[in-house]
Amino acid sequence: MKLKLLFVLTLASVGLVTPAQAENVQHTQQLMNSRECQRCDLREVGLVYANLSGANLQEADLSLGNLAQIDLRNANLRGANLAGAVLFSADLRGADLTGADLRGADLRGAQMGGVVLEAANLEGANLVGAFDIPSQILTAEDLYMWGLAEAQRGNFRGAIAYYNQSIGLKPEFPHAYLARGISRFRLSDEPGALQDAERAEQLYLAQQNEQGQLAATRFSEGLQALQEAEARGSRGRGGNFLNFLGSLSTVLLRFLF
């Protein structure tokens, strides 16, 4: 299942603000007292930091709810409606979300080890920074895009972590190698950057991608020129090369569109 990275956050995903009080108070109290609330009406409920591990919320309506940092370990959420819900940094380890509606849900930073997502709808869900995401719901392209987003924020180590995962899923994905090379260069790992640039160039050539091959070749040649300049005692990194890197970031984003 291909996920769509959300670059523009909605109000629901930005805030830990208290949502409008639209939930059924009786159902909320039932849930907190017994942890049993099948088919309950909990729309727009506010349950920030709540401990509901092992709760039975099968087919409950939690749409647009603020569930940031909630503990839902091993909870039964089969068929639950979590569309648009804020699950930022939620603990979902071992939860059963079979058939759940998670469209547009904010799952950034969520703990997802052992979660069951069979037949779940994750269209538009934001999983950036989530931990232990089941591999069957991710693509190499998703991870590559997340890496680009981290690089744009200046988090080059985080970007490399995503590129590594992308390459792990798709070892012959040249965009990820080239992007990782740029992040390595930004961290002053010039040998690693050159290695990635050369690997990307080889893959682009094999895949007959002329635009990609040209970008990788220019990056590789620029790195080699910098290394030669440093060997001669010149420490300057070259304004033209840095300008090229800036334009290359735009090219990397365009590759998938």
Image (cartoon, helix red, strand yellow):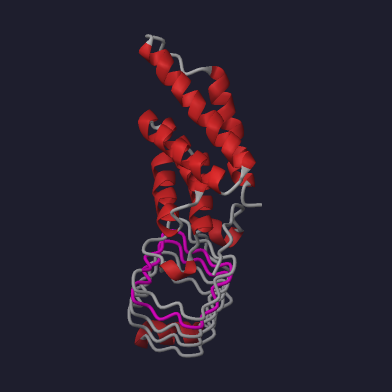
Q: Is residue 243 above or below residue 128?
A: above
Q: Quadrant of residue 10?
A: bottom right
Q: Is residue 188 visible?
A: no
| Total marks placed | 0
Q: Is-magenta flag for residue 101?
A: yes
- Prevailing SS of the magenta stretch: loop
Asked if 188 appears above or below 141 in the picture, the reply is above
Task: Please give the range of residues in magenta.
Answer: 84-112
Residue most extreme to the right: 257
Residue 230, image quadrant: top left
x and y percentages locating residue 145 in the rendered image: 54, 51
Residue lying at 35% horizontally and 88% vertically, measured from the top left? 34
Q: Position of residue 163 (x, y in %)?
A: 44, 49
- Residue visible at 48% across and 61% down? 127
**Quadrant location of the N terminus in the rendered image:** bottom right
- Whether 132 is among the magenta residues is no
Left or right placement of residue 165 versus residue 45 in this view: left
Question: Residue 150 placed where, x, y %?
Answer: 48, 45
Q: Nearer the viewer, residue 156 or 226?
A: 226
Residue at image coords 59%, 52%: 7
Residue farthest top in this picture: 233
Placement of 205 over or under 18, stated as above or below = above
Q: Which one is in front, 91 or 157?
A: 157
Residue 82 in view here:
yes
Pinpoint residue 200: horizontal percent, then vertical percent. 49, 42
